[in-house]
């Protein structure tokens, strides 16, 4: 794991920006002797300071195709390895990640801006991704059925081929391994591309795969932007499937790019603008603290940069003012910039959030906490810090209420009665997640089952079991991942009919 040591020593030396390079055919392709790699490079900055920390290649279409060919060449052999063998390799990956947990967590925190504590949680989840799928494949079963005593039918699944695995910048290692682990477990090979904003932990992963004994070409990791590298990757006719997590507009672009390739598997996990519904009963004395804590966590964890964050809070009118007051006091006390709140991921993202907050000022929204942050100067590096923002008096048709801001910004709006709550919650193009805070058992089901969201959390948030279907409704995506749902993404099924 030479790369792990190099990256680790950079943490203490901090003199020069590092150079990342692609991991193809089981090896890192160093820029100086890489004919396949473009000389074009992308700069990556540390969100907490604004300093340049590394550069990455903007991999050009011919080099993308080369990586895909490596995955294609590795497929026949990898797809035929026994489940026990693949399981053992994935288990080694999870153990090696465990051994290097702190290195990955420190880099994730530096690269993405998140707190180290949050980064550790995500590295642990990445470790679970590999350990979960390493055992899942050992227990798969196929049901056989007799048809009227004349034929026996059964489903036969085989690996679907070469996959493009593309991830966003908010939970870089966790989301990329959520794709790599099942892809390899089910016998597919892949070319993975992390976000150009946060490529470091994906780069380090190459060293882990080498050491774990993943055969060359089974997993290739390339770097670059979406327009050049990502588009070439998803569009290639050699790629049999795409597992993508990112914004809705990019999901639409990927659908367009692959529209003529009918058989290509597409799993699209896209954006959200998730509602949190606070019913009056959840502000009863005994559960009040829990309600405030969950609503705050759902709003501000990872600076609001989680696709599942509840950024539209709706509160039953009778407790609205109390909620706003107590929620604001709680957030002010617990969510401290630089301690429990990290920096937002990039200058571009900082500017996007800042523009929404300037709009909030223009539209005369009430700021209960925080204010529009200043524009940052180009000439000196500065961190991309935004304090938690709590807004009321935001119009229903304001862009602040409609668009996914994906930062530490929540709006709070009153509602009257259950039907209105459901209507407001569903009044969005998105349908990824929803949070329901109530103590009424029948309401939990009644309202929960009406919410247009792939994931509904009642009196909790972000609880995950890796076998449950994960994905969104409406413009939040198509397809589900997790356990057997990931198997649907990464395998093809044929039904065999044998004479009895
Ligand atoms: P993005 O869509 O801009 O980029 C995501 C990835 O797609 C990056 O690796 C990017 O380089 C690549 N890409 C961009 N254009 C491409 C193209 N034409 N072809 C192929 N690849 C392309 O998203 P982002 O800004 O990195 O991430 C934020 C978004 O991700 C938010 O909308 C958030 O809700 C969403 N997200 C969704 C989930 C989920 O599970 N549903 C989880 C996390 C984040």
Image (cartoon, helix red, strand yellow):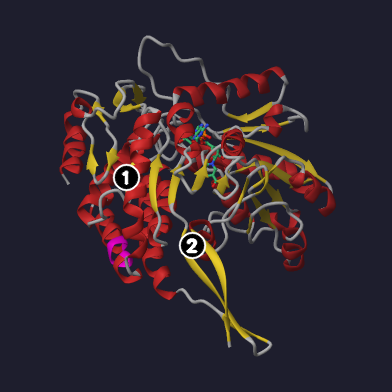
- Taking the spot 21% from the left edge, 37% from the top edge, the residue there is 7
Q: Residues within 10 Å of mark 2 (few under 14, many from 20)?
A: some
Mark 2 → mark 1, Cα distance in angstroms: 30 Å
Residue 338 lies, in percent from the top left, at 40, 33
User: Which secondary structure dominates the residues rendered in magenta?
Assistant: helix
What count of labels does the image hold? 2
Residue 211 or residue 389, whichever sits in front:
211
Quadrant of the rendered image containing residue 253:
top right
Q: Residue furthest bottom?
A: 149
Q: Residue furthest top?
A: 379
Quadrant of the rendered image containing residue 77:
bottom left
Q: Up-down: is 235 above or below 482?
A: above
Residue 98 lies, in percent from the top left, at 27, 56
The question of residue 461 being in magenta is answered with: no
Write down the residue under mark 1.
Answer: 70
Q: Secondary structure at mark 2?
A: loop
Residue 239 visible here = yes
Contact, CB < 8 Å: mark 2 with mark 1? no
Q: Secondary structure at mark 1?
A: helix
Residue 143 lies, in percent from the top left, at 55, 79
- Taking the spot 50% from the left edge, 28% from the top edge, the residue there is 386
Write down the residue under mark 2.
Answer: 466
Residue 348 or residue 151, whichever sits in front:
151
Numbered range of the magenta stretch: 86-90
- Taking the spot 21% from the left edge, 32% from the top edge, the residue there is 30
113 displayed left or right of 240: left
């Amino acid at each position: 794991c030479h790369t792990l040591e190099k990256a680790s020593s950079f943490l203490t030396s901090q003199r020069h920006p590092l150079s990342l390079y692609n991991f193809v055919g089981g090896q890192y392709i160093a820029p100086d002797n890489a004919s396949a790699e473009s000389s074009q490079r992308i700069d990556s900055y540390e969100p907490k300071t604004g300093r340049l920390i590394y550069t990455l290649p903007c991999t050009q279409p011919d080099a993308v195709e080369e990586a895909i060919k490596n995955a294609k060449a590795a497929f026949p052999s990898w797809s035929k390895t026994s489940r026990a063998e693949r399981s053992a390799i994935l288990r080694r990956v999870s153990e090696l990640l465990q051994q290097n947990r702190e290195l990955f967590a420190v880099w994730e925190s530096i690269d993405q801006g998140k707190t180290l504590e949050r980064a550790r949680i995500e590295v642990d989840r990445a470790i679970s991704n590999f350990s979960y799928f390493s055992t899942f494949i050992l227990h798969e079963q196929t049901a056989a059925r007799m048809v009227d005593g004349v034929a026996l039918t059964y489903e036969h699944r085989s690996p679907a081929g070469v996959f493009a695995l593309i991830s966003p910048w908010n939970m870089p290692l966790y989301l990329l391994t959520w794709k790599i682990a099942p892809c390899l477990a089910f016998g597919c090979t892949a070319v993975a591309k992390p976000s150009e904003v946060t490529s470091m932990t994906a780069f380090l992963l190459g060293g882990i795969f080498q050491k774990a004994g993943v055969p060359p070409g089974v997993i290739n990791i390339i770097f670059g932007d979406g327009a050049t590298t990502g588009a070439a990757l998803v569009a290639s006719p050699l790629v049999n499937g795409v597992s993508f997590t990112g914004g809705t507009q990019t999901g639409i672009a990927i659908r367009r790019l692959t529209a003529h390739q009918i058989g290509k598997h597409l799993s699209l996990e896209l954006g959200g603008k998730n509602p949190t519904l606070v019913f009056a009963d959840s502000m009863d004395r005994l559960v009040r603290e829990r309600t405030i804590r969950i609503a705050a966590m759902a709003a501000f964890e990872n600076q609001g940069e989680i696709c599942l964050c509840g950024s539209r809070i709706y509160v039953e009118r009778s407790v609205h003012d109390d909620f706003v007051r107590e929620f604001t006091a709680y957030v002010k006390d617990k969510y401290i910039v630089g301690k429990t709140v990290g920096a937002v991921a990039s200058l571009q993202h900082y500017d996007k959030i800042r523009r929404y907050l300037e709009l909030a000022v223009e539209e005369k929204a009430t700021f209960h906490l925080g204010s529009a942050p200043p524009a940052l100067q180009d000439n000196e590096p500065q961190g991309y810090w935004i304090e938690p923002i709590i807004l009321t008096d935001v119009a229903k048709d304001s862009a602040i209420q409609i668009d996914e801001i994906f930062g530490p910004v929540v709006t709070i709006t009153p509602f009257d009665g259950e039907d209105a709550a459901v209507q407001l919650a569903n009044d969005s193009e998105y349908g990824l997640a929803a949070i329901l805070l109530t103590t009424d058992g029948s309401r939990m089901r009644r309202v929960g089952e009406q919410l247009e969201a792939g994931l509904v959390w009642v009196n909790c948030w972000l609880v995950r079991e890796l076998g449950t279907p994960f994905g969104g409704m409406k413009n939040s995506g198509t397809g589900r991942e997790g356990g057997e749902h990931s198997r649907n993404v990464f395998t093809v099924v044929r039904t065999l009919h044998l004479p009895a």
